[in-house]
Every structure is written in C-alpha cells, then in structure tokens.
Amino acid sequence: MDDYEDLKEKYESLKHEFETYQSFAESTIQIINDKNNLLEKKIDSLFSIVEISKYINSKVRDENFIAMINDMIIGILGVKYSTIFIKNSIKFDIVATNVPKQYSDLLSEKHYKVLNEQELFIINSKESLIFARNGDLDIHSIIGVPIYIRGNYTGYILVEHTLYGFFSYDHIKFVSSIANQIGVALENNVLYNQLKESSIRDPFLGIYNRRHFFNVVEEKIQKDSSAKFAIVMMDIDDFKKINDLYGHQFGDEALIKTSRLLEKSIGANDIVARYGGEELVIYIENVKSKEEVFNKIDSIRVKLSEDAIFYGNHTKNITASFGISYYPYDSDKLQEVLSIADTMMYNAKKAGKNKVISS
C-alpha cells in the first residue's frame, strides 16, 4: 500500500510538472509566434519601404511622381484620403490628393493651422473631426507627417480614414519613412530639372541652344506635318567691329540685350535660340500670312536699332540683319528651310544691313 501511495504521489508530481511545463511551453510558443508575427510585419514593412524607395527613385524624372507616390500611399495603407502638401514662400500648395474637388477648398482652408505646427501627429476620434467634409465622408482617424529636405521644413503628408481607431503609431513610422523618401526624391527632382534645363539652354544667354531648337521644331513637324511656320535667322551687324572697338564685354551685353528683346517680342508658342556666335534663330508658329510675319520681324528690327546699348563708358545703337523662310512653302525639310532663311539673312547684309528679307 505504501508503494502504491508513493507511486501515486510521484505520478501526481510528474503530472503537475508536465502540466506546468506544457503550460509554460505553450505560453512560450505563443510569445515566440507573436514575436515572429511582429517580426514578419516589420520585415514586410521594411520590404515595402525598400520597394517604395526603389519606386520613388525610378520615378524622380517624371513630372507626376508626387501624385504617383500619393496613389501608392492610398493603395498600401488602404486609407480613404491622402494629401501631399509642398510649402512655397507664401503658403502650402496641394501637389497631390484624392480628395474630391468639391471638398478640396475645405481641405486647404482647414489644414493650414496643423501644417504650420510642423509635427508628427495621430488623431483618433469617435466624434467627426474638424477635417470632416460631408456626411458619410466624415473623418475619424488622421495622421500627419512633415517632409524635410536637409533639415528644412518642406511639406506635409496627411492621411485620413473614416474609421475610428484605424491608425496606429506603426502607420506613423511607415508614413515617416515615405516622407523621408519624398524629401530625398524632391531634392533629386529639383537637381534633375536643373541639369535638364542647363542641357537645353545656352549657358551665357539663357535662351535655348541650337540642338534643343532642332529637337523641338522637328517634334512639332512630326506631330503635325501640315503646320505652317516661319524660321527667322538673325545676325548682329558688324559684331566683330563692335567687339574690337568697345570690348568683348560690350559685345556680350549687346547679345544679352538682343536675346531679351527677341524673347519679349515673340509669341507664347514661338521659340528663340542661339544658333551660333552672334546668330540667333526664331521659330514663329501658326503663320497666317508672309506679310504678318515680315511686319512682326521688321518691328523687332526697328526696336533693336532704336534701343541703345549702355555698358561701362560706352553707348551705342546696334543693328541686325534678318532672313525669313517658310515651312512648307519653301521646303518640307527643316534643314532646307533654315538654309533658305540663312541665305535671306546674308542677302540682307549684302543689301546694306539693318534689313529684313523674306523668301
């Protein structure tokens, strides 16, 4: 009997130990599973951030890349609204949003106070928030994350949902990582656009260069081969003599002032570019008559001759010779049209300079 009681006691003790161990093991397994699930979420989040970074960097040259990022935020987070603001010197501009147009005025008006605080925030409210727009579109969860470029406050991301308690601080971390990527992408986009602009403009005069002029006009011809336009070649008269007498800096000033005069005198869709040296070329769109083009260029010639150049101790009126040709009347090939305009310009010089000659 004693042996039976001893065995029973040992059995009960082992059973208790086993149950304790089993409970501990199950609890530990649950903790490990929870940690694994959390780790998987973090890995997924990190993977998403890496993929987002790749996506943003691949789209930095696209003019609509901020709108693409905004769409991506909506898709990944499954939110109701997302809006990206970028700050200019005066106010915040909405550069991307999916908020319906009929509510966008409320959005831009009611968010400014929050935007100026420049802080991360998360709001969950059972009551409809002040950002609410209309009926079933009322917002109950909002997160806001500022965008910085090299420590300078540049903009804001506001993400909204109709469900109460939808957002957590994990969302804040996620959107913050996107905000950082946007900051880098915006800076890269600015640098890219500056580089792109410098590649198509003459570094001294600031007007388009010859290569870009050809590219744009050829593209216009490809889009509409029936278009009628004029090409004007212009050359400052006696430019070498001006440089020799008054110095190259005076000659530079004459070129700058001439190019500015041309830019002011042509139409919004016309193009002026530096062809080479002191030669400038003009594309005039939508030609209705040769007479109209001739009168327009002749008025430029007169303005140029009457507008004195002042530089240092020197003052001088300069003149220029102009040659005009027409597409497709003279030729349906751009190079030939340019060549004819060039010939007309040299005919103007031979005829006494300070003249306009048309084909």
Image (cartoon, rainbow, N blue to C red):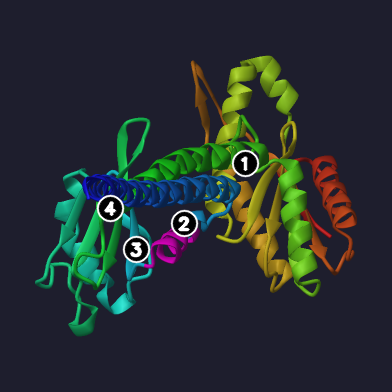
- Give the CA distance from mark 3 to mark 2: 10 Å
Horizontal relation, residue 39 to residue 3: left or right: right
Please tell me in which quadrant of the rendered image residue 200 appears: top right
Marks 4 and 3: which is nearer the front? 3
Residue under the point 31% across and 45% down: 21
Q: Which residue is mark 1?
A: 196
Which is nearer the N-term, disc 1 or disc 2? 2
Q: Marks 3 and 1, Cα distance to the nearest angstrom? A: 30 Å
Q: Which residues are magenta?
A: 68-78
On the image, numbered disc 2 is attached to which residue? 69
Earlier sequence position, callout 4 versus callout 3:
3
Residue for point 44% across, 62% down: 76
Q: Is residue 135 left or right of residue 88?
A: left
Helix, strand or loop for the magenta stretch, by majority: helix
* Residue at the (68%, 70%) spot, across then down: 286
Magenta span contains residue 193? no
Residue 304 horizontal/vertical position (percent): 58, 42
Q: Decide: is 106 above or below 123.
A: below
Q: Nearer the viewer, mark 1 or mark 2?
A: 2
Q: Amino acid at mark 3?
A: Ser
Under circle 1, the secondary element is: helix
The vertical placement of 345 against 289, above or below, is above
Q: CA distance from mark 1 to mark 4?
A: 26 Å
Residue identifier under label 4:
92
The mark lying in front, picked from 1 and 4, is 4
